Amino acid sequence: MKNIINKTIIGTAQLFSYYGISNFEKDKKNKKKAVKFLNFCIKKGFRKFDTAPGYGSELLLSEVVKNKKNLDITTKIPSLLKYKKKEKFKIIEKSVKDSYIKFKQNLKTILFHNQNDINFVLNNFSYIKRIFLNCKVPNFGFSIYDLKKLKILKKQIKKDKITLQVPINFVDDRFLKVNYPINYSISGRSIFLQGLLINKNIKKRLNKRNRLLHQKYFDYLDKNSINPYEICFSIIKSSKIDNFTVGFDNIFQVNQFIKKDKKIAFLNHKTRIKKIFSNKSILDPRKW
């Protein structure tokens, strides 16, 4: 269990927002409740946390971990698309400095949040790399959705250390089939697919066809007495992925994670369930 906890990054996008298709938690602005959740995770041995300025949780997380040591914080740089070149450099530098001031030595990684900023970063790689080094941030990289973006990165970044955050869950294993360079650190996200894979009760964002597929998926789980948490957590044992960001909505879900057996493979069931999710649009939250 200790190895699994060490491999897990606690996501914070859901703390102050209704992130996800099944996040119905009340009191989203309840700071006391969020602090209790974060401190509970730390008490249970979790040392890695993922945040971003746009989540509304970055400042709160920095306050919770202020006097704590040996943590590993990942945050993001907002989208640069709407800005001119000179402004982009200023935003990168300000974002990196602001995040370092918040987290100090606990800040280990900063990712570019929008995958469409990749070309700009690659075209100015040496300069941007110096910004991170000057601000004492050891790792930077990208949050990506598409294999095409990964192909671009692999073609141009061959020696520099880089971190990639990619969507991985047991019904969408595209990024598990890739051979990664040794200098790439891979962080999985969306193991619950924004809650779609663990909750029957979802928001009305899916079209009729995908809602029927979602219902068919839970019918299959019920018929075969499969706990949705267990089958989702089973992906974490993958040796190709260095760590996973998991967005728990509450302490109950954290306890479910700690208690459930991650060694169960579910191989035959996963093959059958993947056939249920044959419509690829259900695997990409951007298309819901």
Image (cartoon, rainbow, N blue to C red):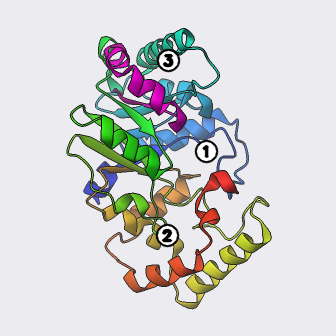
Q: Residues within 10 Å of mark 1 (few under 14, many from 20)?
A: many
For disc 2, the marked residue is 171
For disc 3, the marked residue is 95
Q: Is residue 285 magenta?
A: no
Mark number, residue 14 = 1
Task: Compare residues 287 and 64 and report the one nearer the observer.
Answer: 287
Identified by mark 3, the residue type is Ser
Q: Residue at x 39, y 27 (%)?
A: 122
Q: Residue furthest bottom?
A: 223
**Is residue 44 visible to us here?**
no
How far apart marks 3 and 1 lie (CA) works out to 21 Å
Give the structural element (helix, strand or loop) at label 1: loop
Q: Is residue 82 left or right of residue 160?
A: right
Q: Residue 238: x, y in percent?
A: 30, 63
Characterize the magenta stretch by its predominant secondary structure. Answer: helix
How far apart marks 1 and 2 lie (CA) works out to 22 Å
Look at the image and give the residue range highlighted in magenta: 107-132
CB contact under 8 Å: marks 3 and 1:
no
Q: Is residue 263 above or below residue 64?
A: below
CB contact under 8 Å: marks 1 and 2:
no
